[in-house]
């Protein structure tokens, strides 16, 4: 199975900051990588698909990038609505696998 | 608008069975596969498998072979997850998710609590 190593597990940032969350794939997954935001008691919400594509309706403050097997989610101009847990997900092959999640809190 | 609406929370005893439903609306049900994802309390997401909504063929992740069954009521645009012989470790929220490349729409989740 493909392992997705996500870091950091948690982070705290201030309003207006720029933050980056990373996922390292244990083998090649091409661009079959998505990012989800999950708020407490809610279902995950698709933010980025195909490693770099912004889902409709997601603010342009969010962006995804790839460098080899390293994938990143960057959030610019952090706002209180960005708090939550972020999950990466590879859908290159079965079984699909997720990162362990990153809890983002605002100071 | 596209929606996946799941059934309500369940409280079960060990050894019992549970059936969770996921009703799709706003799109052609058979055009997209339906996936199932487990989230234990305070834990991350775990992919359980998927069902081909056109053929009805299910595919299970290794950890979900045996007690877990995916099924369809295609005429009702509904996907179901049945778990038999429930164990304490089945306590979790179960999500259905439509796959369009990534998982673009999710159900609201069903909390299943297994407790004696």
Image (spheres, coloured by chain):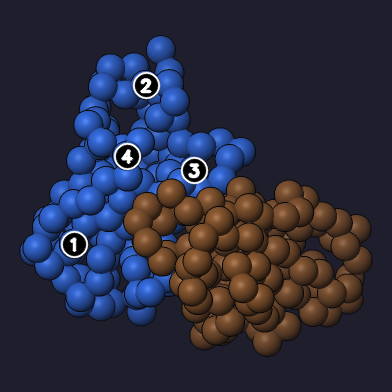
| Marks 3/4 same chain | yes
Measured from the top left, where is residue B42 in percent x and y?
61, 38
Quick one: which residue is furthest to the top in this view? B116
- Name the subunit of mark 1: B
Q: Which residue is mark 4?
A: B62
Tell me the SS state at disc 3: strand
Q: Which residue is mark 2?
A: B87
Residue occupying the point 22% across, 56% down: B51
Say whether disc 1 or disc 2 marks the residue closer to the N-terminus: 1
**How many angstroms separate mark 2 from mark 4 (CA)?**
17 Å
Q: Residues within 10 Å of mark 1 (few under 14, many from 20)?
A: some
Residue occupying the point 9% across, 63% down: B55
**How many angstroms separate mark 1 from mark 2 (CA)?**
27 Å
Which one is in front, B24 or A94? A94
Say whether disc 3 or disc 1 marks the residue closer to the N-terminus: 3
- Asked if one can make out residue A54 in the rendered structure from this viewpoint, the answer is yes
| Marks 1/2 same chain | yes
Q: Do the numbered discs 3 and 1 sit on residues whose CB atoms are within 8 Å?
A: no
Say whether disc 2 or disc 4 marks the residue closer to the N-terminus: 4
- Asked if one can make out residue A46 in the rendered structure from this viewpoint, the answer is no
């Amino acid at each position: 199975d493909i392992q997705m190593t996500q870091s950091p597990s948690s982070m705290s940032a201030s309003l207006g900051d720029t933050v980056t969350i990373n996922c390292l794939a244990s083998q090649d997954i091409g661009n079959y990588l998505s990012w989800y935001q999950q708020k407490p008691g809610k279902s995950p919400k698709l933010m980025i698909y195909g490693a770099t594509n912004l889902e409709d309706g997601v603010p342009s403050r969010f962006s995804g990038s790839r460098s080899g097997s390293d994938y990143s989610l960057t959030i610019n101009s952090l706002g209180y609505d960005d708090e939550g847990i972020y999950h990466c997900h590879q859908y290159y092959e079965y079984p699909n696998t997720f990162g362990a999640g990153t809890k983002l809190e605002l100071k | 608008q596209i929606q996946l609406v799941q059934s309500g929370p369940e409280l079960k005893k060990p050894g019992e069975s549970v059936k969770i439903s996921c009703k799709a609306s706003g799109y052609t049900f058979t055009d997209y596969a339906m996936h199932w994802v487990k989230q234990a309390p305070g834990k991350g997401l775990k992919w359980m498998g998927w069902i081909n909504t056109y053929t009805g063929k299910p595919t299970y992740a290794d950890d979900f072979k045996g007690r877990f069954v995916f099924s369809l009521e295609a005429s009702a645009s509904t996907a179901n997850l049945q778990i038999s012989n429930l164990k304490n470790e089945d306590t979790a929220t179960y999500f259905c998710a439509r796959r369009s490349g990534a998982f673009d729409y999710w159900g609201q989740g069903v909390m299943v609590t297994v407790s004696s």
